[in-house]
Image (cartoon, rainbow, N blue to C red):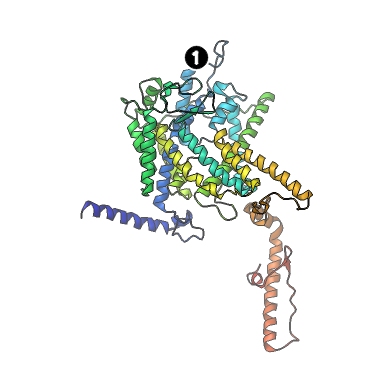
Amino acid sequence: MGLRGFFQKVVDKAVFWEDRINSSTFGRVFRLDGSGHPKQIPGSSFFREIRAGFTTFATMAYIIAVNSAVLSDTGGTCHCPKTATDPTCKYDAGYEVCVTLLKQDLVTSTAAFPGMGLNAYFTYQVVGWHGTGMVPYRIALTAVFVEGFIFLLLALTGMRQWLVKMIPATIKTACGVGIGLFLTEIGLSYSAGLGAITSGYTTPVAIGGCPTWKLDDHGECTGNVMSNPSMWIGIFVGGILVAFLMAFKVKSAIIIGIALVSIISWPRNTSFSYFPYNEAGNARFEFFEPIVAFHPIKGILNVQQWSLGEASGTQFVLALVTFLYVDIIDCTATLYSMARFCGVVEEDGDFPDRRSHTALMPGAGIADGGRTGLTAMTVGFCFLISLFFAPIFASVPPWATGPTLVLVGCLMIRQVTNINWAYIGDAVPSFVTLAFMPLSYSVAYGLIAGMLVYITLNTMIWVVVYLTDGRVVPSNWNEKEVYRFGFGKKDVPKWMLFIRDKMLGKGRRVEEHKVAVELVDNASAERNSSRNGSTDDKVVVVRPQYDGRPISEQELRIGH
């Protein structure tokens, strides 16, 4: 048996075991294709979900490094002895040492609890750089802690589902397109991507591609534009090569691209090394060198401030409300868009399990075939392992993951054809939504802007149509999407129905069941009498009503 025959045998064995797993109870729990579950997800399979989980983790691994770098800018629990000449402790050596230790703690905590939804908002708009913002670090942490429980309560009770159904369908579709553009912008930026674009001084965005030491204080290139070798390695190896492999449906193409770019970028004696011989490169290499290491969290556990006085209480409420509404809107828009992207949105706009934190990077896993919670569990397992391999996963360069985000953005933007462009009342709000997300660098702000325009514009149109009794209507009025605000009985959370049945319906249904049994017996007697030709013994059956409608005979038979 040659090498080809050996590999074919391995593949056949893998397919055999995958089919067995898919059709097992395990596959039925995750609704894998072939499991026999009435709501099985077409195209989902065990190994495909695992592979998608690895892909998602590969695109999210940079979070371990980026999240710690961003959050350490708050200064955390480090004390800043402010002076007139250095109010932010920018040049205080002792403070900088404390921030370095804080960053190492944050690497471990990010690996244990990955997420980047609000880190930049938390750091630069709430706490501020080195604590110069409106809310102190410890109080902001308390607000995040409480907000998490409120968010969980809203998810478990089904209240977040209401937000999804309240958003017009065309806006929800535009969110997917906007997130695709947002991912593309992130993938092209310096912080988490190729570095092909950067912020400008005279323009909002400028062409980039220069080495980082050529960036001025405004983040704009002062020379050597589009000459950075790391950017070109990312474009050709992580971008074009991966797209070429995807054209031939090569499995794990995204992982291959990320791994190749990372390995190429690790040697130090190159112009495109992720560990150059400077202060930042030496720090990265020092963290990378052990390969396997676990850094215990020392300074950021249980540091919330629970003594909330008058000023502290105001700051706490401000931070809590801010985090809650941004997190809900951000999570709702992202989760719906990702669910639509992977094709699990039902006809009524609903989709499976919404009890989670979301990020944009799972789009890569969805593009690689991920459809179920098994993908998320794989990502969680990888992050658990990364607690001990954090030096490796924190050393994936941004130009290795940037091309992947651009490719995912390309896949997600295909939803733009599903937006209702025929009617201006739907088209303009949708365009504002998809354009504002990347331009404001926020999914939440994009959704807020789109909803504001949608409500204002369509309310004005409705007033004109109402006052003229329908004689004056905008062009293509018949092309508008029907907006259903509110919920029917099928949209009520199951826990509410359970409580209603317990409090109001239990005794009532028992009585109805008894009546139904008697009525079924009477109905049988009636049919027998008719069959025997007797009219004197016929029983007149008056069917009871339930919630304003007659009970059908079929419901009587099963004991309604």
Residue visible at 50% across and 25% down in the picture: 72
Image quarter in which the C terminus is found: bottom right
Total numbered circles: 1
Residue visible at 51% across and 25% down in the picture: 200
Instruction: Point out residue 210 in the picture as x, y percentages from the top left corner.
Output: 42, 25
Instruction: Point out residue 216 in the picture as x, y percentages from the top left corner.
Output: 47, 20
Image quarter in which the N terminus is found: bottom left
Is residue 353 visible from the viewing direction of this image? yes
Residue visible at 44% across and 59% down in the picture: 34
Q: Residue furthest left?
A: 1
455 or 53, nearer to the observer:
455
Is residue 329 rendered to the left or right of residue 240?
A: right
Instruction: Point out residue 475 in the picture as x, y percentages from the top left corner.
Output: 68, 50
Label 1 sits on residue: 92
Instruction: Point out residue 167 in the picture as x, y percentages from the top left corner.
Output: 63, 46
**Circle 1: element type:** loop
Residue visible at 48% across and 22% down in the picture: 99
Report the amino acid beneath label 1: Asp
